[in-house]
Image (cartoon, rainbow, N blue to C red):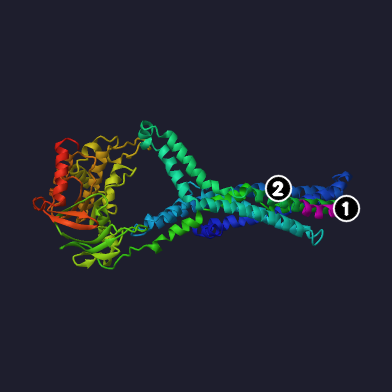
Amino acid sequence: MGALLRLLPRASLPLTAALTALALLDAALAPALMLSVGVLAGRLPGAGAGLGTAAGHGVLTAFAVLCGVYLAGLLVEPAIEATAGRLGRRVAAYTARLVMHGSLRPAGVAALDDPAVADRLTLAQGQGTGMLPVARAVTALPALFSARAAGATSAALLIGFHWWAPLPLIAAWTVSGAWRDREVRRAVDVQAGSTTELRRAEYLRAVALDGGAAKEIRVFGMSPWLVDRFTRAWLAGVGRVGGNRRRAAVRDLVAGVSLVAAHAAVLVPLAVQSAHGEVGVARTTVYLQAVLGTAALGWLGDLQWTLARASAAVPPALEVAALPERDTVVSGPLPAAGLPASGIRFEKTAFGYPGSRRPVLDGLDLWLPAGGSLALVGANGAGKTTLVKLLARLHDPTAGRVTVDGTDLRDLDVTAWRHQLAVVFQDFVRYELPARDNVGFGAVRAPRDDEALARCARLAGLDPAVAGLPHGWDTPLSRRFTDGTDLSGGQWQRLALARALYAVEHGARVLVLDEPTAHLDVRAEAELYERFLDLTRGLTTVLISHRFATVRLADRICYVEGGRVVEQGGHDELIAQDGRYARAFALQSAAYAGGTHA
């Protein structure tokens, strides 16, 4: 809860101050109401003398004060709810910005590839762990504060009966409350420690509800399997919370006995002294209310459950916000405009992903001349896509270096360097946003340029798809939105290519195509790449593809195996060498000739 309290003034200092003032006022009304009831009870015996008497006026005055305090509480409560609601929304938005900032600001992606960070992200978003929105914690805070303040003032009022009277009640309620609070926090912590299982359960639930997966789920009869695996993963995550119920039952019994004894220690003397007239009606009424009011020092049930579950997302959100401090990709001081002029070189480059003992790249040497086209081929897992990630500085090499015109890539301003790149990854993102944004993200900082959008769509063969959209470029590319629609796999790939062309239109000088056209047939892919190479002549271009009809169009071909370039040259040259490339080309040609590939 401490992290949440520190977050409140950062989200909105004025609302935090207003909520604090209202909570203090609400806390003051509780003892005022107790005293008002006591005063009225003490004056009621004299009410029979009539309204015109001093006793009658005293009753009316006490009743008016009681009503005033009560009505003030009725006014303060909605004010607290409204203020807490506004502050809760501010805190939720602020926390969301913290998480987005923490996950987006790092220049590299190494931290985001860490499973522990993925767990933190899940917790920070309150997903899959039975958590509540952080705004609920803010609305619970003033209620908790008012309750605790009322309990404390109730205990203070009991000092007027006997100095020792509040002590047994404070001890019994706080100890029993602490036991229950510890159980709740243990349950929340155990759930947080079970994030991997709960994240898997959340994924399975999302798959079951995803419209895109609906066809395969039904065709393959996956529904029972999904429900069963979701149930197992969920129970594995939350099943640890049960703990030792026998020990908890013993604690509850001890707490109950302690509370009975504490109340008896105060109520029995109060009853005896009241019966002997030693304590008057007014004081007896106040003390009875105070005894009942000390219960607010104990466990407050749903209120504390809500606060614990809703505030649990704040500490991991702050951890995610600190991710930029762990970023291993540090921007350099040198400008990158106009690069490369001569070329890009990988020098004895090695790289391995965190948690893996096997290096993906192992002493790779490669030269990419500026303005030329290079094709990378090789088996899956050979390191081709990893090479692209190093080129884009999503990761840095663990050994060796990558240079641009002789300058280490790490010495260049990373943002400026990425402005020189237009990359289409194999697993490119299908943004559920308007088509205009999907293409425009290629140069997100550039002003709106409808002519460039249309030109890039035409060059990528996307214009027929755009023409068929209900609202043209402004159509959301998702059926989950009103008037939205979806594209076919091939259309999405052409859109990704148009996005890269849009980046080229706005100054990118290095074009990387990492198998983005797998949904196209061989002839369509070859024609598209041929047109691309012609349109982007003069750019430094890298092609990655398993289809040799495509890669043979490049100026030079490199065969990557075991994290190294083992063969390179032109298509005819590599065929003449009769090595790995030639054998792979022969196998693929035979497969196509036999009609086993589309």
Q: Residues within 10 Å of mark 1 (few under 14, many from 20)?
A: few
Q: Is residue 242 left or right of residue 228?
A: right
Mark number for residue 516?
none
Measuring from the top left, give residue 22's x and y in whole percent. Answer: 62, 54
Quadrant in which the C terminus appears: top left
Q: Is residue 464 visible?
A: yes
Residue found at x 88% / y 54%: 273
296 up-or-down from 225: above or below? below
- Whether residues under marks 2 and 1 lie with C-beta atoms below 8 angstroms apart, the answer is no
Q: What residue did someone put label 2 on?
A: 70
Quadrant in which the N terminus appears: bottom right
Kindly identify the amino acid type of the residue bearing the numbered disc 2. Tyr
Measuring from the top left, give residue 497's x and y in whole percent. Answer: 23, 46
Q: Quadrant of residue 383?
A: bottom left
Cα gap from disc 2 to disc 1, whole angstroms = 31 Å
Q: Is residue 577 magenta?
A: no
Q: Is residue 37 left or right of residue 531?
A: right
The magenta segment: 260-271
Picture mark count: 2
Q: What residue did someone put label 1 on?
A: 272
